[in-house]
């Protein structure tokens, strides 16, 4: 068993190396498949139900009701549609492939293959594609008897989408949307499925659904991603950049998602003919007298703010104290909101702060330093962390 998984892991790693090399070979880490874990839990719970039925602890009607509830929960977890991200390139695509390939392979193996065939203790409760299909059909049958169940229609739409049956997913989402017309999550999923049913195009009705979702929730992450993608495909690059820019405050600023979004914003702005702003560049270093007051894992924040304006950061970079000294570049692609950019303010102050707690707000005991006000395109800026926050 160990040899089997070791060989499988080695083959997967070798394959990924070949696939990711053309995509800049950025390293990433894929977590254990949540789908596989949910299926394992489902199997254990189903065994317990069967044992209780055999022991007379559960009546057949109670057993069937509990089984139906288990199946509904499994479908809800297993069939959750993948998050829609804006068009990625280069390193963002490499990360996406690096995560998606092993995760999808593992999920398909658990669904369609026989992952326990090499295990002599294998049981008879393996969940295969046929069983998933049967669960979907039972859910569809229940909805015919109870057509006002919005969550049921939503779950059925996700299930059909996960199975690649987009026309049926559209029909299920439409029934849910009629009953919950102000649900932004539902409208975004509906638009996504309708676009897939139309060959991957979001033009027309899918984009109208996206705009309805954004009217309800202007900060809806998936709707913003879809709106940007739709605008990009119709070559309205300025609009695409605007939608994707609005996603940045909704994701962790130092995450791979944020970096991929910033890359997409920069690409859309370039295609729109917007002049690129180089931003402010320089180095952050630590005063020798404070060296013994930091730990390598302490959070390091470097941010720009307007010298004569609101205190809100215009661009933020996060690293760790162990990286010091570091080179930095703070530009418009790192803006927290489209209206608050480095290029929009002629005089900028750059601040660097080490936080043991990891809190973005200054706290007593933090270490910090700041530059003098300077032009928003200054180069060679040096920021020394040389004081303790009181």
Image: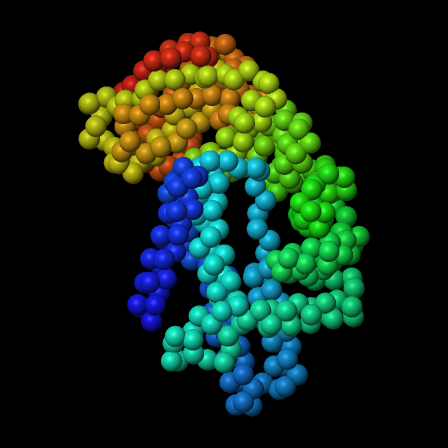
Task: Give residue 95's position: percent from left, percent from top.
Answer: 44, 43
Task: Give residue 137's position: percent from left, percent from top.
Answer: 69, 70
Does the image show residue 368? Answer: no
Which quarter of the image is occupied by the N terminus? Answer: bottom left
Task: Name the foreground residue: 132 vs 389.
Answer: 132
Its colouring scheme is rainbow
Task: Give residue 273's position: percent from left, percent from top.
Answer: 59, 18
324 horizontally vs 48: left or right: left
**In this rendering, is residue 31 above or below 203?**
below
**In this rendering, is residue 264 above or below 377?**
below
Which quarter of the image is occupied by the C terminus? Answer: top left
Q: Residue at x 62, y 86 (%)?
A: 59
Q: Residue at x 27, y 33 (%)?
A: 322
194 horizontally vs 10: left or right: right
Task: Name the foreground residue: 348 vs 257.
Answer: 257
**In this rendering, is residue 148 above or below 63?**
above
Q: Residue at x 41, y 44 (%)?
A: 20
Task: Name the foreground residue: 231 vs 77.
Answer: 231
Count the marks: how many? Answer: 0
Task: Give residue 166's position: percent from left, percent from top.
Answer: 69, 55
Does the image show residue 80? Answer: yes
Which image quadrant for residue 115?
bottom left
**In this rendering, is residue 389 above or below 83?**
above
Q: Residue at x 42, y 32 (%)?
A: 360
Which image quadrant for residue 348?
top left
29 horizontally vs 311: left or right: left
């Amino acid at each position: 068993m160990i040899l089997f998984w070791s060989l499988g892991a080695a083959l997967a790693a070798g394959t990924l190396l070949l696939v990711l090399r053309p995509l800049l070979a950025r390293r990433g880490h894929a977590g254990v498949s949540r789908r596989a874990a949910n299926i394992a839990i489902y199997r254990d719970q189903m065994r317990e139900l069967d044992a209780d039925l055999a022991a007379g602890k559960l009546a057949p009607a109670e057993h069937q009701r509990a089984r139906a509830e288990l199946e509904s929960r499994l479908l809800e977890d297993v069939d959750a549609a993948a998050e829609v991200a804006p068009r990625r390139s280069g390193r963002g695509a490499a990360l996406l492939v690096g995560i998606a390939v092993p995760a999808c392979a593992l999920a398909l193996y658990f669904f369609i293959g026989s992952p326990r065939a090499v295990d002599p203790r294998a049981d008879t409760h393996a969940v295969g594609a046929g069983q998933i299909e049967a669960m979907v059909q039972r859910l569809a049958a229940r909805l015919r008897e109870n057509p006002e169940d919005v969550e049921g229609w939503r779950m059925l739409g996700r299930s059909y989408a996960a199975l690649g049956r987009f026309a049926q997913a559209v029909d299920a989402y439409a029934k849910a949307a009629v009953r919950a017309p102000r649900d932004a999550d539902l409208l975004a999923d509906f638009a996504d499925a309708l676009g897939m049913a139309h060959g991957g195009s979001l033009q027309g009705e899918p984009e109208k659904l996206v705009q309805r979702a954004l009217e309800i929730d202007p900060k809806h992450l998936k709707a913003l991603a879809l709106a940007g993608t739709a605008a990009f495909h119709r070559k309205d690059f300025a609009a695409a950049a605007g939608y994707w820019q609005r996603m940045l405050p909704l994701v962790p600023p130092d995450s791979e998602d944020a970096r991929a979004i910033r890359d997409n914003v920069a690409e859309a702005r370039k295609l729109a003919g917007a002049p690129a702003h180089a931003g402010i560049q320089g180095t952050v270093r630590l005063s020798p007298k404070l060296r013994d007051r930091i730990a390598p894992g302490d959070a390091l924040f470097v941010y720009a703010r307007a010298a004569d304006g609101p205190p809100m950061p215009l661009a933020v970079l996060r690293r760790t104290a162990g990286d010091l000294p570091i080179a930095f570049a703070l530009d418009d692609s790192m803006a927290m909101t489209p209206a608050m950019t480095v290029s929009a303010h002629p005089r900028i102050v750059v601040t660097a702060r080490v936080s043991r707690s990891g809190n973005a707000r200054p706290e007593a005991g933090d270490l910090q330093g700041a530059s003098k006000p300077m032009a928003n395109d200054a180069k060679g800026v040096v920021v020394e962390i040389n004081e303790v926050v009181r």
